[in-house]
Image: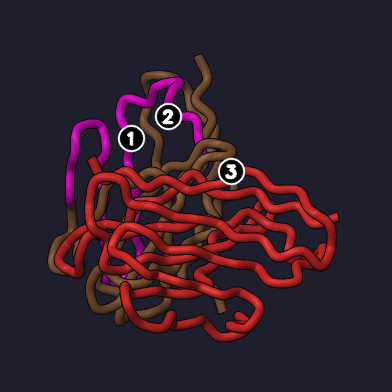
Chain colours: A brown, B red
Amino acid sequence: DQQVKQNSPSLSVQEGRISILNCDYTNSMFDYFLWYKKYPAEGPTFLISISSIKDKNEDGRFTVFLNKSAKHLSLHIVPSQPGDSAVYFCAASEGGWGKLQFGAGTQVVVTP
Amino acid sequence: GAVVSQHPSWVICKSGTSVKIECRSLDFQATTMFWYRQFPKQSLMLMATSNEGSKATYEQGVEKDKFLINHASLTLSTLTVTSAHPEDSSFYICSASQDSSNQPQHFGDGTRLSIL
């Protein structure tokens, strides 16, 4: 049973524009949410996180929004750069920084 | 900081062979390490959680006698795929976290395992 879902397998965005990645979850006990970026043949790299007591967290070009009532979070990347082209995974954990449930990932392609 | 090294990065071996994959935290002590596997175009699936000095906790459906995990020190965990078969071919990734207080997991670069 997939508890974390990323319904968009791919996203194409023009350089300089905003990339918006979406993630939905079903487990209301999740209290930490993370976004990871992954290049082919490499492990995921941590990008940004948010705890359930917040609804927004910002770090440079990356902002994560959490809507607990809708069980939805999103990652905004602005402005998008060619180096942002990668697969982005949404992940969630229950009860702190424990084991993570991952979404299926969204392939982002930033075009010149 | 927070570098996790995984070795080997790529293994090809015959069916029936046992394969050991190492996961090391290079610049921090990892009280907890996690092992994931990823099939093509699918999500990372947690296989097991290992805590230093204790037995690993396996996720439902993961055979603990098939996938042996040892976490003998705060910087090293190993996953041994015993008597590997073609269906075990996958991308195995480890991660480590420093402690349980607001530290995200940091991942190794993964091991591509191909069983012929």
- Chain at numbered mark 3: B
Q: Chain of mark 1?
A: A
Residue that badge 1 annotates:
A77
Residues behind callouts 2 and 3 on a single chain: no
Whether residue B66 is visible here, answered yes or no, is yes
Q: Quadrant of residue A7?
A: bottom right
User: Looking at the picture, does residue A50 appear above or below residue A60?
Assistant: below
Q: Quadrant of the N terminus of chain A?
A: bottom right
Query: Mark 3 belongs to which amino acid?
Result: Ser
| Residue labelled with disc 3 | B9
At mark 1, the secondary structure is: strand
- Magenta-drawn segment: A57-86
How far is the residue under mark 2 from the one under mark 3?
24 Å
In this picture, residue A52 sits left or right of residue A87:
left
Local packing at callout 1 (Cα closer than 10 Å; few below 14, some 14-19, many 20+) is: many
Q: Nearer the viewer, mark 1 or mark 2?
A: 2
Quadrant in the picture for residue B82: bottom right
